Amino acid sequence: MSDTKLSRRTFLRYLLGTGAVAAAGGVGVGLAPAAQTALARTDAPKARYALIIDTTKCVGCGACVHACNIRNNLPEGKSYVHIVPKDDRGRQWFLPVQCQHCADAPCARVCPTRATYRHESGVVLINEKLCVGCKYCEVACPYQARTFDEERGVVDKCWLCLDWVSEGKDPACVQSCVLGARIFGRLDDPNSEVAQLVASGKAKPLHPEFGTHPAVLHYIIEGE
Ligand code: SF4
Ligand code: SF4
């Protein structure tokens, strides 16, 4: 097991130890689906962070995809970030996609064990100890942001490198993007670049019609 994987698990254990998981709904197996849905909606705290992807700067180089692979010690070719090539009437551009950390997350609503929960930071996490590998969440995610780890029998996805973020550092994908297409910061700081981009209306959620209210990820898409 790598150091990165260890640090991630240690972090999740820390969350369990502090009761953050319980507070966010990581316990309570057996609650009726309707009750879980209600909890997911009413307890959703305000996101503290935003990751804005400037699609006008992204060249689809895949550095973020590889950085994610290395950070999370994933098998070759696997990443929590994928790049979707776009061609709009001859204009070619790239759309990097990963977990949108939805405030109203379908993945959390369908999870029968409440392994998927929303952390107080707004980041959607998975308590692997509670995951039974049913893949309901994978099917429910409209952004196709989840993958199944065959070896461990649990689902997995972007967790925004929350251990690094808690230490004031940027997620691996942000650190890797030398073109500055990834902008990360605190939404609760009105002077931050991300807060100003969101306030200006320039950065918007991806597919707002899904009604999931992506809490952390916003996109700047030229021409929209
Ligand atoms: S590293 Fe930056 S420029 Fe490269 S694909 Fe990712 S977001 Fe786009
Ligand atoms: S993007 Fe998918 S995996 Fe991420 S919180 Fe939303 S529904 Fe869940």
Image: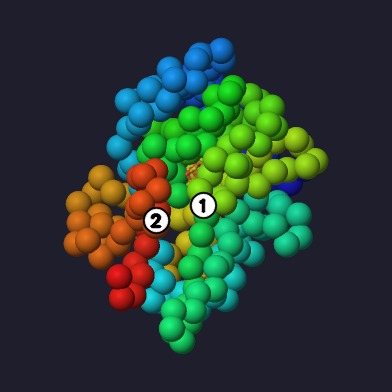
Q: Nearer the viewer, residue 49 or 11?
A: 49
Count of numbered circles in the view:
2
Q: Quadrant of residue 3?
A: top right
Q: Nearer the viewer, residue 219 or 189?
A: 219
Q: Going 50% across and 74% down the picture, which residue do you hit?
A: 86
Q: Residue at label 1?
A: 143
Query: Is the C-beta of the residue carrying label 2 under 8 Å from the nearest atom of ligand 2?
Result: no
Q: Is residue 161 visible?
A: no
Up the image or down, 155 lies above or below 50; here it is above
Q: Position of residue 135 (x, y in %)?
A: 66, 36
Q: Nearer the viewer, residue 198 or 67?
A: 198
Could you tell me which secondary element the residue under label 2 belongs to? loop
Task: Give how far apart the Cα atoms at labels 1 and 2 are.
Answer: 9 Å
Q: Residue at label 2?
A: 207
The reply to whether dot 1 and dot 2 touch (C-beta < 8 Å) is: yes
Q: Position of residue 31 (x, y in %)?
A: 51, 14
Q: Residue flagged by tag 2: what amino acid is it?
A: His
Q: Going 60% across and 42% down the picture, which residue do you hit?
A: 139
Q: Going 20% across and 52% down the picture, which residue do you hit?
A: 190
Q: Which residue appears farthest toward the bottom when viewing the image?
A: 90
Q: Quadrant of the C terminus?
A: bottom left
Q: Position of residue 222 (x, y in %)?
A: 34, 75
Could you tell me which secondary element the residue under label 1 belongs to? loop
Q: Mark 2 or mark 1, which is nearer the start of the sequence?
A: 1
Query: Is the C-beta of the residue carrying label 1 under 8 Å from the nearest atom of ligand 2?
Result: yes
Q: Going 43% across and 83% down the picture, which residue do you hit?
A: 89
Q: Residue flagged by tag 1: what amino acid is it?
A: Tyr
Label for residue 180? none
Could you tell whether 42 is left or right of 139 in the image? left
